[in-house]
Structure formats: C-alpha cells, structure tokens
Amino acid sequence: DIQMTQSPSTLSASVGDRVTITCRASQSISNWLDWYQQKPGKAPKLLIYKASSLESGVPSRFSGSGSGTEFTLTISSLQPDDFATYYCQHFNSYPWTFGQGTKVEVK
Amino acid sequence: QVQLQESGPELVKPSETLSLICTVSASSISSAYYWGWIRQAPGKGLEWIGNIYHSGSTYYNPSLKSRVTISIDTSKNQFSLRLSSVTAADTAVYYCARFGVLTVTGFDSWGQGTLVTLSS
C-alpha cells in the first residue's frame, strides 16, 4: 500500500498568512493526488484534483503543486472560512489512501 | 446538481452486519463514475472503503476486504455497502461519494454522511 504522510499535523496561522501543507507519498504516484477540505460535522470538499487542477467554484487562493512523491497545498492569503482540516488522497493504485490530515487553526 | 444521500440503521449490534444505501439524484449511476464509500471514526481521519463501477466491478480496501461488499442497483440509482462482523472499531461516519473516471476529478460530490454506532 502507498502511505501518504502530511506535515504538519497542526498549523497555527492568522488571517492573511500564506499557508503551505505538504503531502509525501511512500512511492511515486505521478500526479494522481487530490486535496480536500473538511469542516467539523461536514463532508469533505474537493479543492484540488490531479495535484494542481482547481475544482470549479474553489477560490483561486488555493493552489496545488507537485508530482511523484512530494506535493503541496498552498493558501495564498488565509481567510476566516479556511480554518479547517485538509487531507490529501492518492488514487495511483488500489488501495486509495488519505493522509492523516492537517488542521489549520487560529494562531 | 448531483446529490448523494446515505440511509440505513444508525445502531448496529456487534458481530452483526452494517448495511447502508446511497441514493443518487441528478446524476445517472450508469455514467462514467466510480461510486465510493469512505468512513471516518470519531476524531480520526478518512479511510477509503471501496468503489464500484456501474458494470459491477468493485475495488476494496484490503484491510476490510474480507468483510465488505459493495453492490449497485442501476434501476434505483442506488449503491450499497455491507460490512459484516462489525466491532466497536467500525463505529464511524460513513460517506458515499462520486469519483469521475474519465475526467479523474476526485471525489467531487459527497453525501452528508451517516453516523453508525456499535451498541449492544
């Protein structure tokens, strides 16, 4: 199985900050990676697909990059609505796996 | 706009079988999507359970494979999850979701989730 490791597990930030979350795969997954945002009590929401494509309706302050084994999700200017938990997920091969999540909290 | 809705018992007894249905509206379940189940134990991360295609092809998480069955009913536009021999470790919010096969656009639509609790 391909393991997905996110860092950091928790990130404290302020509104307006540039935020970067890293996701590393235990083996190459090309660009077969998605990013999701989840708020308490809600279903995850797709933000980025195929590592760098912005899902329709998602604000342009979100961006994704990377290929192979290292990927990043960047929020260019953190907004109040962005405090949430973020997950990466690969779909290179079965079983699909998620990272353990990164919680973005108020500094 | 596509909608997915999970339904099924919220309480299941240990050793019994958990059964959930996902009803899909505004999207044909026979179109080019994987229909998936994902779960989240309380306070924990997301765990992919498995996918099904309208042809009936299934893909399961090996950690659950011996206990999981995902099936599809194209006439009702529904797909379902059965998880046998449940234990307390299966207490979780269960989500159904849609993944584009041709566009490879990730799980772009999710149900609201249903909390299934193990209780004797």
Image (cartoon, rainbow, N blue to C red):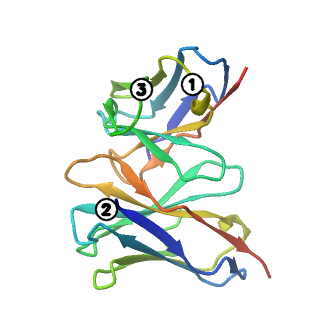
Residue underneath mark 2 = B34
Secondary structure found at label 2 = strand
Q: Nearer the viewer, residue A88 or B77?
A: B77
Give a yes or no on whether discs 1 and 2 share a subunit. Answer: no
Q: Amino acid at mark 1?
A: Gln
- Marking on residue A71: 3
Q: Which mark is in front, 2 or 3?
A: 2
Q: Chain of mark 3?
A: A
Q: Is residue A25 left or right of residue B114?
A: left
Residue underneath mark 1 = A79
Query: Is the residue A20 above or below the residue A69 in the image?
Result: above
Q: Residues within 10 Å of mark 3 (few under 14, many from 20)?
A: many
Residue drawn at x 29%, y 33% as measured from the top left: A30
Q: Amino acid at mark 3?
A: Phe
- Where does residue B56 sit, x and y in percent of width and height? 28, 75
Q: Chain of mark 1?
A: A
Q: Is residue A87 left or right of residue B54?
A: right
The N terminus of chain B sits in image quarter: bottom left
- Where does residue B84 sit, x and y in percent of width and height? 57, 80
Query: How far apart are labels 1 and 2 at the CA level?
Result: 33 Å
Secondary structure found at label 3 = strand
